Image (spheres, rainbow, N blue to C red):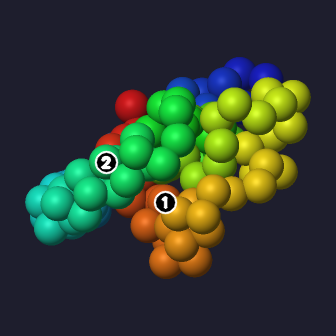
Amino acid sequence: MRSLLQQLSRRRVYDSTPDQMRRLIDLVIACALFALTAPLMLLVSVAIRLEAEGPILVRESCIGFRGRRFQMLKFRTVRYDLDRSVPLWGRRPTPLGEIFRFTRIEALPQLFTRDR
């Protein structure tokens, strides 16, 4: 039983041709969306830098397909100098961070997140 589970977990996700085509389409769409949103992301980056000290992007740990963990990028929407023991989602957002969360602009860097 254990060897069967190991074989299933080692199976490549993109073995069949339809899966490869779907992956190719995903990459093309992500590149096109990145090209369209790059100016907006640049403006958001500058606004975050001017509003408060700290990094522009933060990494969030997520669980994806088949339970694989991966790091997702997001724009920082909270003050960086607050207590680090409080998770990012529990901290109070900055004024611009509230706007970014409401409009979902904070999630634009997810276009950089890729499956390895």
79 or 30: nearer the viewer: 79
User: What is the secondary structure assignment of the residue under circle 2?
Assistant: helix
Q: Secondary structure at mark 1?
A: helix
Q: Mark 2 touching mark 1, by CB under 8 A?
A: no
* Residue depicted at x 53% and y 41%: 52
Residue 106, labelled with which disc? 1
Q: Which mark is residue 46?
A: 2
Q: Badge 1: few (under 14), some or many (20 or more) residues near its Cα, within 10 Å?
A: many
Image quarter in which the C terminus is found:
top left
Q: Is residue 66 above or below residue 1?
A: below
Question: What residue sits 37% from the left and 53% below the top?
Answer: 47
Q: Quadrant of residue 19?
A: bottom left
Label ID, residue 17: none
Residue 66 shows up from this direction: no
Q: Closest to the observer: 19 or 38?
A: 38
Rendering coords of residue 107 (x, y %):
47, 60
Left or right, 45 with respect to 73, comes to: left
What is the x, y in percent for residue 1? 81, 29
Above/below status of 101 relative to 66:
below
Please state which amino acid type lies under the numbered disc 2: Val
Q: In the image, what residue type sits under mark 1?
A: Glu
Can you name the residue that lies furthest to the right here? 85
Q: Is residue 84 visible?
A: yes
Kindly report which numbered mark, 2 or 1, lies closer to the viewer in this rendering: 2
Furthest toward the bottom, the residue is 103
